[in-house]
Image (cartoon, rainbow, N blue to C red):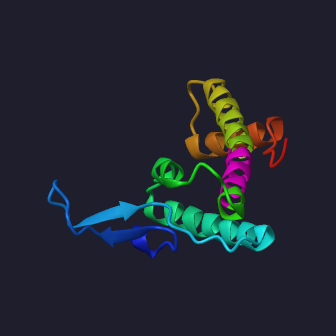
Amino acid sequence: MQLTDLPFIKDVKLSDNPKGRKTERIFWQVAPTGDFSKDGLTGTQYAREFLNYAQKEGHCPLVSIVKDMPREFSGIEIGFLSVIGTISQVGMVIGDSILEREISFQEEIGNLPKDTKDVHAAYTQAQDHAKEKVPLRLAS
């Protein structure tokens, strides 16, 4: 998938450009309808498409997108940024939980006897103890 496959990112042709570039990338080119609810749904859909792109491609040009947004937000911008904000919050909760579990697991590994013969079994047991000690939180 290309970045310009996202419905709000466009490359526009430049007719007279002193830098010699033939196109300029615009990261936020949308057409609000004036119907706040409908525009909010459009923004929500754009956010989903953007997040899918970022996950698949490993590229997240969120700063460029926000930079190209107008100062006066329509429902499209509000819908888009609301989804990005919500997903960020969820990611932090899950990320913190995973980090806590990993720290617990490393502590369990550190407690293993130095002469452990069956490393795989000991490793699995340490993982199980960490999971019991630090359950994965999906919400705070």
| The quarter of the displayed image where residue 20 is located | bottom left
Residue range in magenta is 80-91
Front in this rendered view, residue 3 or 78: 78
The image shows residue 113 at horizontal and vertical percentages of: 62, 25
Front in this rendered view, residue 51 or 67: 67
Q: Is residue 81 magenta?
A: yes
Q: Is residue 86 left or right of residue 68?
A: right
Front in this rendered view, residue 32 or 63: 32
The image shows residue 32 at horizontal and vertical percentages of: 64, 70
Q: Residue at x 16, y 55 (%)?
A: 18
The image shows residue 119 at horizontal and vertical percentages of: 57, 40
Front in this rendered view, residue 12 or 99: 12
Outermost residue toward the front in this view: 16
Please say if 51 is above or below 122: below
The secondary structure that most of the magenta stretch takes on is helix
Q: Residue at x 68, y 72 (%)?
A: 42
| The quarter of the displayed image where residue 17 is located | bottom left
The image shows residue 39 at horizontal and vertical percentages of: 71, 70
Quarter of the picture containing the C terminus is top right
Outermost residue toward the right in this view: 140
Please say if 89 is above or below 23: above
